[in-house]
Image (spheres, rainbow, N blue to C red):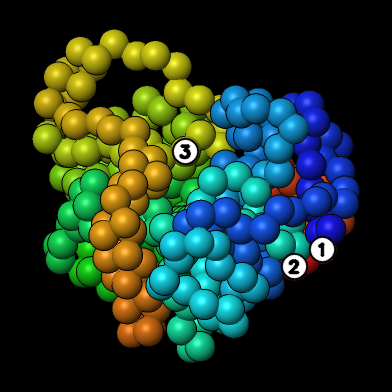
């Protein structure tokens, strides 16, 4: 038996309960992992609330880090006691779980379990956003919404390391300090300032090459007005609510803009892309271009509290659950 968070009906944080679960032996191609740390992400709220429908009951969570306990038939790349991290299908909010071996990455000793759990979904998201969706290069100007969030802080750091001018938006002065420290050259508090007007002032009317938006409804369509002609709007999350359908002709009116709604799991669907992306991320961490400080730790039994604080946007940076 192992302890796991189970959700039998979708709704608020109260629908999560800590239960004893019978975990079968790892099947063909699977690995049994004892989680030492579990990543906490906004996508967990989407699944819990029903915004992302899935079969009930289920255990939430898509990332974690820990040690290999056992391997199933056909697994040759991993063995017991290996340190691993993963981003995978649902099931991470548990002391132990079975994971498809294709979802695992060997974790070097230089990276802690906590950082391993915190870096996978958020770090790999930042990796594909900066390195594949829009290839940021020196001299680019990038706008990062929710710059003090888990992905936002990584985008600020990595964007600066790539030579870009990073402009971040935040909702408080405390968050502004975090974004500035992470590498944002300019920080806009959108609770007190018009971020579109400030972008025009900061860039002297040249605007931005790309906007990375994990906020959604409250920052759209203003984000489009922050882009230069042929610029790219990248919507990778909807913390404030989903963006309503819009007339695609608006993109032409505002300068032949590009718009995309990518997801991590598309970018890492091929094992070789997954491994290459993870190695790129770990190189950035080893160089010191990216650090992922853990700002909050929760017990597995306190998962509801973790969701309450994450949902109210009271958290900054990365948070982890410790089984």
Quadrant into which the N terminus falls: bottom right
99 vs 5, nearest the viewer: 99
Write down the quadrant of residue 43 in the picture. top right
What mark, if any, has residue 299 been given in the picture? 1
Q: Tell me the residue at 86%/37% (across/down).
A: 14
Instruction: Estimate how packed mark 3 is, as few (under 14), some (14 to 19) or many (20 or more) residues with alpha carbons within 10 Å.
Output: many
Q: Tell me the residue at 51%/54% (across/down).
A: 28
Circles 2 and 1 in contact, beta carbons < 8 Å: yes
Residue corresponding to mark 2: 322
Residue 25, visible in the rendered structure: yes
Q: Position of residue 307 (x, y in %)?
A: 74, 46
Q: Tell me the residue at 61%/75% (across/down).
A: 67
220 vs 66, nearest the viewer: 66
Residue 179, visible in the rendered structure: no
Circles 3 and 2 in contact, beta carbons < 8 Å: no
The mark closer to the camera, 3 or 2, is 2
* SS at badge 2: strand
179 vs 44, nearest the viewer: 44
Instruction: Estimate how packed mark 2 is, as few (under 14), some (14 to 19) or many (20 or more) residues with alpha carbons within 10 Å.
Output: many
Pick whichever of labels 3 and 2 is earlier in the sequence: 3
The mark closer to the camera, 1 or 3, is 1
Residue corresponding to mark 3: 237
In the displayed orientation, state which residue is furthest to the front.
73
| CA gap, disc 2 and disc 1 | 5 Å
Left or right of 102, for residue 189: right
Q: Position of residue 134 (x, y in %)?
A: 21, 49
Left or right of 225, for residue 157: right
Q: Position of residue 89 (x, y in %)?
A: 54, 46
Pick whichever of labels 1 and 3 is earlier in the sequence: 3
Left or right of 189, for residue 200: left
* SS at badge 1: strand
């Amino acid at each position: 038996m192992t302890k796991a968070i189970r959700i039998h009906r979708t709704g608020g944080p109260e629908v999560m309960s800590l239960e004893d679960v019978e975990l079968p032996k790892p099947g063909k191609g699977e690995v049994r992992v004892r989680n030492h740390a579990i990543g906490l992400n906004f996508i967990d709220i989407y699944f819990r609330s029903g915004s992302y429908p899935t079969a009930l009951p289920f255990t939430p969570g898509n990332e974690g880090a820990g040690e290999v306990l056992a391997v199933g038939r056909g697994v040759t790349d991993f063995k017991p006691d290996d340190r691993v991290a993963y981003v995978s299908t649902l099931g991470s909010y548990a002391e132990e779980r079975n994971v498809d071996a294709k979802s695992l990455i060997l974790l070097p000793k230089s990276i802690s379990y906590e950082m391993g759990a915190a870096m996978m979904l958020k770090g790999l998201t930042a990796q594909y956003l900066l390195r594949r969706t829009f290839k940021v290069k020196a001299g680019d100007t990038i706008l990062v919404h929710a710059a003090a969030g888990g992905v936002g802080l990584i985008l600020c750091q990595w964007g600066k390391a790539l030579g870009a001018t990073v402009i971040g938006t935040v909702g408080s002065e405390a968050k502004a300090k975090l974004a500035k420290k992470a590498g944002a050259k300019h920080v806009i508090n959108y609770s007190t300032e018009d971020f579109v007007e400030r972008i025009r002032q900061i860039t002297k009317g040249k605007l931005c090459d790309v906007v990375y938006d994990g906020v959604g409804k409250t920052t759209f369509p203003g984000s489009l007005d922050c882009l230069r002609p042929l610029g790219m709007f990248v919507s990778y999350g909807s913390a404030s609510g989903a963006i309503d359908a819009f007339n695609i002709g608006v993109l032409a009116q505002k300068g032949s803009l590009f718009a995309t709604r990518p997801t991590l799991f598309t970018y890492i669907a091929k094992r070789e892309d997954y491994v290459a992306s993870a190695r790129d991320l770990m190189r950035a961490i080893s160089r010191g271009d990216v650090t992922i400080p853990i700002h909050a730790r929760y017990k597995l039994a306190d998962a509801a509290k973790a969701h309450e604080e994450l949902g109210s946007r009271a958290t900054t940076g990365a948070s982890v659950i410790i089984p």
